[in-house]
Amino acid sequence: MVRFFNVFVAVCLVATGSFLFAATFGEQFDVPTFGGDVGPALAPRIFLGVWILLSALVLIGEFRTAHEPSSQINFRQFLAVLFIAIGTGVGMTKIGFLLAAIPGLFMFCWTLQYRRIVPLLLISLIAPFSIWMLFTFGFELLLPNSPWFHRL
Amino acid sequence: MDQIFLAITQFATMQVLLAMVIGCVWGTVAGCLPGIGTVAALIVALPFTFGLSTETALALFLGIYVTSVYGGSISAILINTPGTPQSAATVLDGYPMAKAGNADLAIGWATLASFIGGVFSLVVLIVAAPLLASVSVAFGPAAIFAIIVFALTCIAWVSGTSPVKGLLGGMIGLWLTTVGPDDLTGYSRFDFGQPMLMGGIALIPVLIGLFALSEVFHRAAYYFIDKPNDVRNVGFRLPPLRDVKLRYPQLLRSSVIGTFIGILPGTGATAATFVSYSEVKRTSPRKENFGKGEPDGLIASEASNNAVTGGALVPTLALGIPGDGGTVVLLGVLTIKGLTPGFDLVNNNPHILTGAFLIILISNFLMFGLGVLGARIFGKILKMPEPVLMGMILLFSLIGAFVVRGNHADILICLIAGVCGVILRFANYPVAPIVIGMALGSTLEGKLRQGLISARGDTVEFLSEPIALFIFAVTAVLILGPPATRFLVGRKTGKL
């Protein structure tokens, strides 16, 4: 399982590097330079060339290395936290910081098995609200706001 | 002397002092809590940079940077878990001292050693940074290009278990800087028609995603409810003066090792502590007690890991080349505040540099004071529920990504970086080289193209500048040395 995952990541890196390297030969990079052949494709081609070479070496290495069995991963909890974090982040861009952070923080802590309901409710309400107050009125930096409630 | 007075007048304000105290307290607490560490502690404070003056922001961040390494020793001593990777060697003798009922004395030694290591490295920083920055004017594009290649190689070589994976990380970071408008021609690269990529990818959201968010996800994968920590004998006891006199060679040796390893890009405090620990173990007259609660072991670890803080700032402030995640964040803060490290900082803003030195000095004293007064409180802080802490890091990470440019797209970039970061961590790729590659990518590309234009496209002429040639030779030795040694040893023993 560990070998499969590591090989998969290495294959993805080889494929991504190759795709991006091929992209440097597209129309977007076909522009006149100021002499010395230093167009916008020069550095990306060097970086991506080395990227492909190194990822190929990693891929070969993954096949040759004996992988130790992985330690116990709480996979369901990991995925849940990942989706909550993504949901909270995307939510901030759509409904504002406060409306996304309150349920986001509550669900995050709940998923990580913090089940003391009263302190959790208080923390989930007070912490995002204090942060919002501090940034909005203290530093006068507007955090992402909701489309419905002006600054909130 | 004028610079010192100017720095004092600019930095001696209530806001700066308050920011320094808050930075030192947060740095120590964050270092003390296992899993947060220096970079996450700095990232949590990042959103506040935009509301603070340059002086206040520097005080906050340098306070966190200096004290977070020390904080890691407290949990290492009290609960046998290093708060930061840099304190891993502290566990070896710190915890046995605590188990033997000397937790207060162990914290006393750790505090004293950290203080001496920190101040020693500051002296080196004060001497070396302006000197190196002045010399750097003589460096042409090829030499700067060579230094960055050398730095990236060092970083890749010492981070994680596989240098190839480290180098690959560095390349990914370098490529990320080529996304968006090209500085020379203005043409957009690798945007694939996506508006969020047309302006390029900012360093801070990627840094936050790769370090802080991926750490949160990684910990969630391995988080199980633990039994309450067994924290005992918490307090502070300063070691007797005769013991300090007896062990001063170890203190000095560890401080020197930490400072000079810190100057090398990428080596960092974790490497320094283990080098220092083994060196002090080799030379100490009490070497047979190592691992059983010997203060020399604690000194070796703590003096060296705090000495790294000053050492790592030498290339960061003098050349703008960060050595690790913590110095990348500091570099980011300087850039946000419109300061360019290197010759410009030393010559055009010398009072800022002098102010930074003063802040580091005062932060070391504050760290000592926190150790004396706060040891008992830190023991209680170690009982804070981890899910709440991780949740707060998540919120501050998302805010930090947003406030850099006030751009919603940066939150999404931060999340993508977080997901990619945790996948790479699972596959044993170090993430620090990616971020350092990103921090150096634009300069590397700029110098490469500038040098080639002035050499009329002649690559040999560009690369054969004497300083560059010397640095390239050192880099080649670094890359080819270990495989060549293995090859020769294998041939000698017939195990090829």
Image (cartoon, coloured by chain):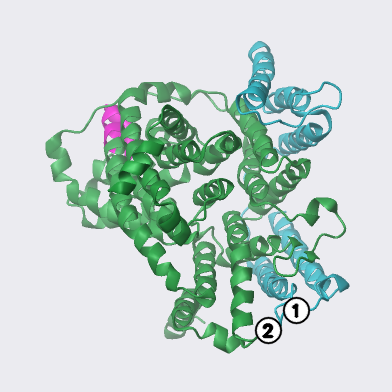
- B368, above or below B86, in the image: above
Q: Are marks 1 and 2 in contact (CB under 8 Å)?
A: yes
Classified by dominant secondary structure, the portion drawn in magenta counts as helix
Residue at 17 percent across and 40 percent down: it is B244
Q: Measuring from the top left, give residue B86's x and y in whole percent.
A: 43, 46
Residue at 37 percent across and 42 percent down: it is B7
Res B369 quadrant in image: top left
Q: Nearer the viewer, residue B73 or B363?
A: B363
The residue under label 2 is which amino acid type? Gly
Q: Which chain is cyan?
A: A
Q: Mark 2: which secondary structure?
A: loop
Q: Tell me the residue that label 1 is attached to.
A: A33
Q: Measuring from the top left, give residue B254's x and y in whole percent.
A: 28, 52
Q: Tell me the residue that label 2 is attached to.
A: A36
Region in magenta: B92-109
Visible residue check, residue A113: no
Q: Which mark is residue B479?
A: none
Q: Measuring from the top left, give residue B297's x and y in whole percent.
A: 29, 46
Question: Which residue appears farthest toward the top when viewing the image?
Answer: A118
Using the rendered image, report if marks 1 and 2 lie on a common chain.
yes
Q: Nearer the viewer, residue B146 or B105?
A: B146
The residue under label 1 is which amino acid type? Thr
Look at the image and say whether residue B76 sits in the magenta stretch: no
- B67, above or below A15, in the image: above
Residue at 74 percent across and 61 percent down: it is B179
Q: Which chain is green?
A: B
Marks 1 and 2, how far apart in space?
8 Å
Residue A74 vs residue B487: left or right?
right
Graded by Cα atoms within 10 Å as few (under 14), some (14 to 19) or many (20 or more), the crowding at tag 2 reads some
Visible residue check, residue A5: yes
